[in-house]
Amino acid sequence: MNLAWILFYLPIAIAALNQLVLRRNPVVPYLATAASGVCFVISLLLLGTTDSAGFSWAHVGGLDIHIALKLDHLSTGMMVVVTGVGLLVHVFSLAYMKKDEAVNRYYCGLGLFMFSMTGIVLSENFIMMFIFWELVGLSSYLLISHWYHKDSAADAGKKAFLCNRLGDFSFMIGVLMLWGISGCLTFEGLKSWADAGGVAQASAGVLGAAILCIFGGAIGKSAQLPLHVWLPDAMEGPTPASALIHAATMVAAGVYMLFRLQLSIGAEAFEGFAGTTIAWVGGLTALLSALMATQQNDIKRILAYSTLSQLGYMVMAVGLLAGEAGMFHLYTHAWFKALLFLGAGAIIFACHHQQDIWKMGGLLGKMPVTAASFAAGTAALIAVPYVTSGFWSKEEILAAAFHGDKFLFAIAVGVAFLTAFYMTRAFVVTFLGKPRSDDASHAHEVGPVMWIPLAVLAILAIFSGFGFVSEKLNATRPEHIANTTVLIASIATLVLGVSAGFVLYRGKESDPLSIPLFRNRFYFDGIYDNFVVRYFQDAFAAIVHFFDELLINGLLVGGLSRGAASAGDLFRKLQGGQLQAYSFAFGLGVILVIHFIVFL
């Protein structure tokens, strides 16, 4: 377990050293990158380890809170994903963030984030997981609003923080409810409780409500409807941070937590309205996000909505009691989506921070390595059969939907078509044709510090789904059962989606399709801004301001200060310096004393 504790503490130790001691020292990025490399090596060494250890952190009544690490097949496999993507993001950032004035603060944020994610993945109980769940929210806020001098970045950070707080409050309620039902909060304790018949004896309604409240935490962290609005805006942060936060780690934490719960209390606890609700929230998120992606022009926003859609797939799988399929897709998706985000970062870097795909074009000849790696990531995302990792994991989710709910299967098939369509659109408009701006005309291939991580991720995007790789990396993988209907639907949607995207967008100078409903994201943001924010947040803020000014400032603070000043004025007037006034006051005092003694 010593290696596990090093893995746990090293990121925060290096982050603290960088921020508190080294600060502006140019060695900070390299030290942080070296630490991430050590964490990745430790993660590889821990593969196949099963153990747990910890210490008592607090004791409240009958509740003993432990900080304890749990090593098993699920956590060690997930740590390889977190540290692997984290290492490549650190390396990529050496070039991408080189000229940033606050690069040391950026690497400190990465270290804090890696520490927080490690705590979630290795946590042995729900209390520890919730603590690090909150830390992930804080560190993601710091990274999203890294360029806080831009109003859009500052607002995006606040939006992400508030949306996650709503989900976290639901998560906390669910954890407390589960504790009240089972009497324990450790994952092993919950498993023992379930094995002893606790699920069967518990009220189905109360247990389902607890599961849905815990799912509320995943809605916030994994950006599911209706709290999905923060993720696209979070693209205001540095692109490498987007690859880490929004591809492989933070947004996947909700799926990981749900599957950990499902392993602990059993899939049968998710049967009924709880599982159905989770599955439909995931399915609708996948569908609406895919529709939104078809009309976005910002390359990072296209990938952001794609992430929302794929997360919807994973959540839907958990709701359909096929958590293994969801976790397998989380594993493959982490590699190819990190590749796409870093590829987008390379494109933005080469095009002088231009993000509009309609101001790109012709980059295939100018950036061949980036184009090839982006093509590999696109192929994995659209699930090109038998040769990409995304095919193997998406097939498992489609099969689970086919056997579990035919309506959700139809939605999943539609999402597969839309994914092939919007990713073909993005690739054709970005890489093919001729340059549509000076930024694209002067673009050139990025240096090896940036393209080597792309090459590594491209290899994983292709091969990580194959058994000889996924088994060695401890990926959670369901047993594959071939289904002809699912395979035909998958291939048909791929061919139709790619064909439609290629025919519609090849050689076009502007978007031939205009669907305001999709382009404006189903007006979710407008509804939130004009109704939720204005009538709830702003109204509540006005009420708080009124009480602050009237009661606290006006009566308590102001009233006490004015009372003290008035008393001071009164006593000051008695000190006039006139002897006859003092004699009169003395005589009056004597008379009053005699009166009280004699007559009272």
Image (cartoon, rainbow, N blue to C red):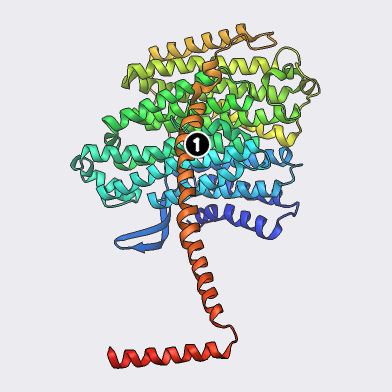
Amino acid type, callout 1:
Val
Direction from residue 504 to residue 49 in the image, left or right? left
Q: How many marks can you see?
A: 1
Assign the C terminus to one quadrant of the image: bottom left
Farthest residue in the top direction? Answer: 503
Q: Which residue is drawn at 53% across and 87% down?
A: 581
Direction from residue 234 to residue 560 in the image, left or right? left
The picture places residue 212, in percent across and down from the top left corner, at 33, 37
Depicted 576 relative to depicted 520: above or below: below
Is residue 70 visible in this depiction of the protein?
Answer: no
Q: Residue at x 56, y 83 (%)?
A: 575
Nearest the eye: 285 or 50? 285
Direction from residue 143 to residue 67 in the image, left or right? left
Depicted 354 relative to depicted 42: above or below: above
Is residue 334 visible in this depiction of the protein?
Answer: yes
The picture places residue 501, in percent across and down from the top left corner, at 58, 11
Q: Residue at x 69, y 17 (%)?
A: 358
Considering the numbered disc 1 on the image, is that residue within a helix, a strand or a loop?
helix
The picture places residue 455, in percent across and down from the top left corner, at 66, 30
The picture places residue 496, in percent across and down from the top left corner, at 52, 8
Nearest the eye: 343 or 532? 532
**Number of other residues with Cα within 10 Å of mark 1, as a class: few under 14, some 14 to 19, many 20 or more:** many
> In this figure, which residue is indicated by the disc labeled 1?
251
Nearest the eye: 141 or 195? 141
